[in-house]
Image (spheres, helix red, strand yellow):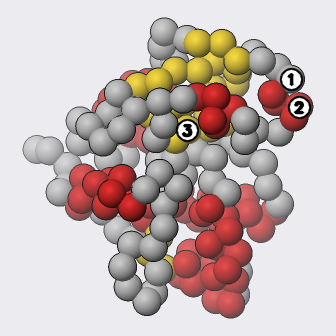
Amino acid sequence: MIDTMVLPTPIAPLSLLVRQGVLIAGGFTGEPGELFARLSPELRAEGMSVAADLGPVTQAVRDYFDGDLDALDAIPVQQPGSETRRRLHQALREVRAGTTVSYAELAERAGLPRTAARAAGSACSQNLIAPFVPCHRVLPSTGGYGGYLYGVPVKEWLLTHESTGRPA
């Protein structure tokens, strides 16, 4: 069974889906079913139940929005994808809060040629675990914010939140 919860955040509701203590989906929507629908048929066959608390995942989200910008890093995540996509998602998790990278730089950090920027963009667009796999920290080298599944205003808010630094 996949446990779900919707947490209020300062920017938008955040739906979280956890399976056996591992975060398998997260996103800025008040409808966990939207994320559940993006899971593999095998995972969807397990079903979904609403949880009152997801333990460490819930606490990490609260800590992150309270200013502990590294709180999400300790949560185990798992999502489908090729070896290339997994490498890109891992490289995304290593981009520190308060910093950004270009798609080409993300590809390079994942050990892929700089020409793999298109693959980096695809990995971001297919990311099921926002903001734990922080695709909001990737910006186009041409300037601006680029796209974001949950809307550019959410991306801008997250980047501003992370650039304000940690509380003393």
Q: 57 or 128: which is nearer to us? A: 128
Instruction: State whether residue 143 is above or below residue 59.
Output: below
Which sits in the foreground, 157 or 94?
Answer: 157
Secondary element at tag 3? strand
User: Which amino acid, mark 2?
Assistant: Glu
| Residue 104 image point, x, y percent | 57, 84
Numbered mark located on residue 26 in the image: 3
Of the image marks 3 and 2, the number of the one nearer the N terminus: 3
- To which residue does mark 1 refer? 45
Answer with the quarter of the image where residue 14 lies: top left
Q: CA distance from mark 1 to mark 3?
A: 18 Å
Q: Position of residue 137 (x, y in %)?
A: 43, 64
Q: Amino acid at mark 3?
A: Gly
- The residue depicted at 55 percent of the width and 38 percent of the height is 26
Q: Which numbered disc covers residue 42?
A: 2
- Is 144 left, or right, of 90 in this rendering? left
The residue type indicated by label 1 comes to Ala
Q: Are marks 1 and 3 in contact (CB under 8 Å)?
A: no
